[in-house]
Amino acid sequence: MNGGLDQAIEAYKEEAQELLSELETSLLELEESPEDIELISRVFRAMHTIKGSGAMFGFDKIAHFTHEVETAFDLVRNGQLSVTKELINLTLLARDQIRAMLEEYGGGARIDESKSAEIIKGFKRIMQKVEGGTEGAESAASAKAGSEADESDEAKSVTYRVRFKPDHDLFMSGTNPVLLLNELRELGQTIVIAQTQDIPILKELEPEKCYTFWDVILTTDKGINAIKDVFVFIEDSSDISIDEIDSGEDVDELGENYKKLGEILVERGDVKTDDLRKVLGKQKKVGEILVESGVVNEDQVRSALAEQKQVKQVRESKQKMEAASASIRVPSEKLDSLVDLVGELVTVQARLSQVSSSRHDANLTSIAEEVERLTWELRDSTMGIRMLPIGSTFSKFKRLVRDLSLELGKDIAMTTEGAETELDKTVIERLNDPLVHIIRNSIDHGIESPEDRVKKGKPKEGTIHLTAQHSGASVLITIRDDGKGLDKEAIVNKAIKNELVAPDAVLSEKEIFALIFEPGFSTAQKLTSVSGRGVGMDVVKRNIDALRGNIDVKSTKDKGTTITLKLPLTLAIIDGLLVKVETEFFVLPLSLVEECVELTKEVIDKAHGRHVANVREEIVPYIRIREFFNITGKSPEIEQIVIVEVEDHRVGFVVDYVIGEHQTVIKSLGKVYRGVEGVSGATILGDGTVALILDVPKLVKAVEIEENQTMVPQLS
Amino acid sequence: MAVSKITEVSQYLTFKLREELFAVDIVKVREVLEFNQVTKVPRTPEFMRGIINLRGDVVPVMDLRLKFGMLKTEKAVNTCIIMVEITSEENSIILGLLADSVQEVLEIEPSKIDAAPNIGMHLNSEYIQGMGKHGNVFIIILDINKIFTAEELASVKGSVD
């Protein structure tokens, strides 16, 4: 029981977090198009849901706080308050505050109550202006709504029952009752029931007379006066009664059930209480009984039923503002274990294919092929489940850009492209921090102040362009700004000062740009709250490395900087190149492999025993896997060099044979082998044996360090 | 210390390293596998023979003979991998132990188990839970948790041999 509640609370928190991020997106969009009704109602709905379910699960503080914001947006929705920068700012602050409150419930830091009070005060101030504006000129109906707003109360949807019984001579005055009914329909959710019992038999019917009358069940927030206005011209001649039947209040206490049918009819005066009691004794359906006994006719019952239905619906929908969308929440562990299973299936399938290809059995081959096809489809759709569009992350950055540029007095617009690009959930989550750092850097160091920009002949407003796109099995994320670009000289000077490079070193542009990812590196002259602490870009590099991605920096002075992150689509399966040394198999990530060339005796002799090869007039150093891993045995006459690119250097790995491409399901080596250098994991081959996945960058680094260590004593 | 640490009747899986009989508490044993092929992880101590594929999971395999200062285990008809679970405070690691042959499951009463002598064993007495007697043979009952502490295993660095 308790567990169920806890779960519900967890679900609420999750839902609220989602709503808050949706809210943020909507608000930022609203800032650009303040007239968009759809956006306004989206904001309102989000607030309403946060409030409603918050109260349900005991988050009273949130419910109370959100109520004020909701009220303001209700006014906006009714066109009484316009969307201003002030309102957006305030609402964004409120959103952050709600988030803080959520975290507080989850054991986070205590929130600043005075801040809440201040935000509420801000909203009240904005709403007071509305009160002042509506006095006088506005119609009676909206004045009423306005006075409701004074009490900082939301304009409620009230359900009315309108009986419109026109005079028989209605048509003589040129009135079309259909138009009137349509006018009512415009006020809100409406059900119109025509009562036809007064229509005489054909012989007696006078076609120019109106015999019909109507019952209208109307739910509107416009107030009773708006309804009266509709009938203003025929008030005197027709019989019009308007009764409030549901005030829209206290749904929780009343539940969603409305009055019984009998009660409604009695209330309308269609049936007397005594009659009702009498027929109720017969234990049939009230409506049927009433019709049978001739107390009321079918139309009356139908009308009453419609009333019952509508009020029920309104109350139901109040309790559950938004219908559950067509998706389900699944704990990510379940997905992880599904991915594991599929990984195993891929391995088994590879074995099956291998066996079937050696058997030359047509039946077996066709089964194996079928299994292969299904396995790949299953693999793809399983991976697809874990894929999420990157868009949610993008909108977070819009907020970041907005707030930071305000703080720094810069004028920056952010554009995004490819928000629908899908990436593995884990990748997206881990991508957040690096992107924040990069964008902060762009805002802080990249884009100049508006005055400087004008001086340089650039538009006053700087832009940061964020794009995501697929490129094979990778996703490219590009952050491009049109700021001042990286200052190569400053970077080199700083690097020399920090002893990262020798003072006389000659560096290529790429090498210089790579320096900004070194720990403790920052060229900012003055410290701001956002950057200059010397952490940041090295963290970016580390995070991207951990995702098996890489970073590319391009920059032109005064034109801007472009940083491209190349990331794998998923972390569980990679494309690998399978190679063999003696009896051992190894997998190199295919994304790093550039080409394979032969290493012949002749090439080795030419290099005088040094581990370098001449590949099309380019010197490529190589690492012998056999030597590095102490694999005994004799290498074949002709070996293979697999050339990979590591941090803009080409490095070769010498192996005995290159087997070919291999879909590699990554398995962790486990705790026992956690500290092993140069190996990032293992994979299971088609025949069930295990191959090691090489951690190419780490391996290169390890060799570098070892060679340097062994060289020093020889020199001294 | 003449009394062994063992006070309850337990079952033990006995196995041979060369011609010597060893045993581990059956509770620790998950299963026994045939020894086929093991993939050596480079730059790890010699006694860590490498990794195998256990129904889709990658599991490390240790060579007990090397750990006890004997010659490396060579593959023979009866060579087996005994999968054991090593536990410490919070860690739990599944690993395989190479044995020249697996014998039988024995029930040994505490009265038939003595403490290991401190000298003459050519084996770290920490590793030994007790010396069991079965008929006229000795069985060295191993304390698996002591031989491979989870912490020790987790801290294996790529040491070059």
Image (tube, rainbow, N blue to C red):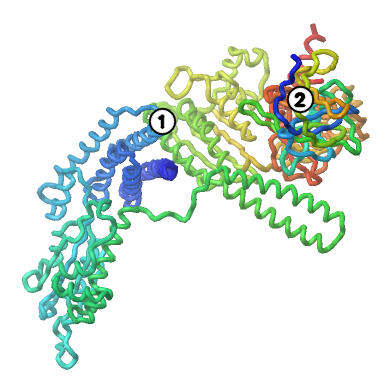
Amino acid tagged 1: Gly
Kindly report the distance in space between the C-alpha atoms of the residues bearing marks 2 and 1.
55 Å
Q: Which mark is residue B111?
A: 2
| Count of marks placed on residues | 2
Looking at this view, name the residue that lies furthest to the front: B111
Q: Height in image: B95 above or below A55?
A: above
Report the side of A685 relative to A10 (left or right): right
| Percent coordinates x, y for residue A637 in the rendering | 93, 34
Looking at the image, which residue is at 77% across and 60% down?
Answer: A367
Amino acid tagged 2: Ser
Which image quadrant is residue A460 in? top left
Q: Secondary structure at mark 2?
A: helix
Badge 2: residue crowd in 10 Å (few <14, some 14–19, many ≥20)? some
Chain holding disc 2: B
Q: Height in image: A683 above or below A368?
A: above
Asked if the residue under mark 1 is in contact with the one under mark 2, i.e. CB atoms within 8 Å, the reply is no
Chain holding disc 1: A
Report the side of A61 relative to A519 (left or right): left
Return the residue at label 1. A107
